[in-house]
Amino acid sequence: MNRYLLICLTLLTSVMLMAAVPADAQTGGITQAGIDKINSEIDRTDQMIERTENAPGVSDNDQAKKALDVARDLQQQAKDKFNDARYAWAYTLTIKAREMLLVAIKLAGSSQNSSEQQDGFVASRLERAADKLERAKEAIEGEDNPALNAIYEAAKDNLARAWEFYRDKRYVPALKMADQVEKAAQKLTEIGSEREHDTGDFDRRKENVSQIIEQISQALSDCGSATAKSFLDEAQKALQLADDLKERRPGAALQALQRARELAMRAERECKGEAQLGQRYDRLQSKVEQLKASSGSLSGSAKDSFDKLISQAEEQLGLADSYIRDGSWEKATAALQAAQLSIRQAEGLLERIK
């Protein structure tokens, strides 16, 4: 096991030690055993900071160093809170410090392998946050509650800011924003789940789901995805099932309504995925054409290398186009990433020649 992986596993295991701290240390009724445990955890975080400082790649990566600085600051706050006898706060802060150390290690490890992997790690976190927020939106759909809507809109804005940080290659703030989005999404999802256990007002809920299905059906009229159409058909069947069950089995009827809404939302995501991948395909295809038009100054081995990279990009774009048409989003995404890598290498070759 290499040193990078060992450090990651150590940090991850230590973050999970939250469950091992006495419950009273998190509720405010702190026993002496709880205080001693928290003090021990703070000492352990100090040791982790020292190991992270010496971890491969950390000192050579600006983003990893920023994450390490954030961890140090959180750890100092933890010590200050402990000295002020605010033990629960101290414990929370030292755990957050460990989480940032894990981010630093991941960023450093990614930069050692390649900038593409670092970029991919952060992008995957943002995509995960986006997916959770979309599910949270589904969970509170139709809820006339200004407070919930405000939480959702704030999380949506934070996600937009996270993507801006990502595009500027400011990975640490992007990851912090993604974490905030996920926490907000989790809160909204839990509230939505609690609401679904309320068996009252079936007709209102049914009407709301019917409107959602109708709106999505109209919005997807130009979508060519067979998968999206299948999801929408299943949503209609689930809606009908809910209506059939409402008198005999009201609980099952509500579950069918929830299923109908989820299926409709999945149909919408399928078409959005197709549209987004299609737009990315068009951008990369246009970039290839621009590069080909700018390659007139190349000759000899440089021209051969450039042509090979462009050929690889075009091959991957051809695969991506086929996968998009088939609705194979993961394969299409992988092909587009491979095409983008070849395009960036071709751009770098042109820059060096200039």
Image: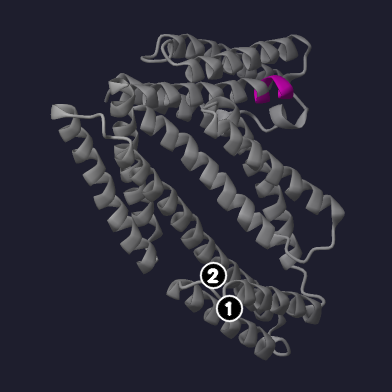
Q: Quadrant of residue 99?
A: top right
Q: How many marks?
A: 2
Q: Position of residue 257 (x, y in %)?
A: 66, 76
Q: Amino acid at mark 2?
A: Ala
CA gap between label 1 and label 2 equals: 9 Å
159 versus 275 height, above or below:
above
| Res. 235 mark | 1
Q: Residue at x 57, y 13 (%)?
A: 69
Q: Residue at x 64, y 82 (%)?
A: 239
Give the quarter of the figure containing the N terminus: top left
For the residues bearing labels 1 and 2, Cβ distance under 8 angstroms:
yes
- 275, 351: nearer the viewer: 351
Q: Amino acid at mark 1?
A: Ala
Q: Position of residue 306 (x, y in %)?
A: 22, 35
Horizontal side of residue 252 vs 4, given as left or right:
right
- 310, 176: nearer the viewer: 310
Residue 220 appears anywhere in the view: yes
Residue tagged 2: 267
> In the image, which is nearer the foreground, mark 1 or mark 2?
2
Give the residues drawn in magenta, as a range.
88-92
Magenta segment: does it hold 42?
no
Crowd rating for badge 2 (residues with CA inside 10 Å; few <14, some 14–19, many 20+): many
Q: Position of residue 273 (x, y in %)?
A: 49, 59
Q: Secondary structure at mark 1?
A: helix
Horizontal side of residue 194 vs 328, given as left or right:
right
Give the quarter of the figure containing the C terminus: top left
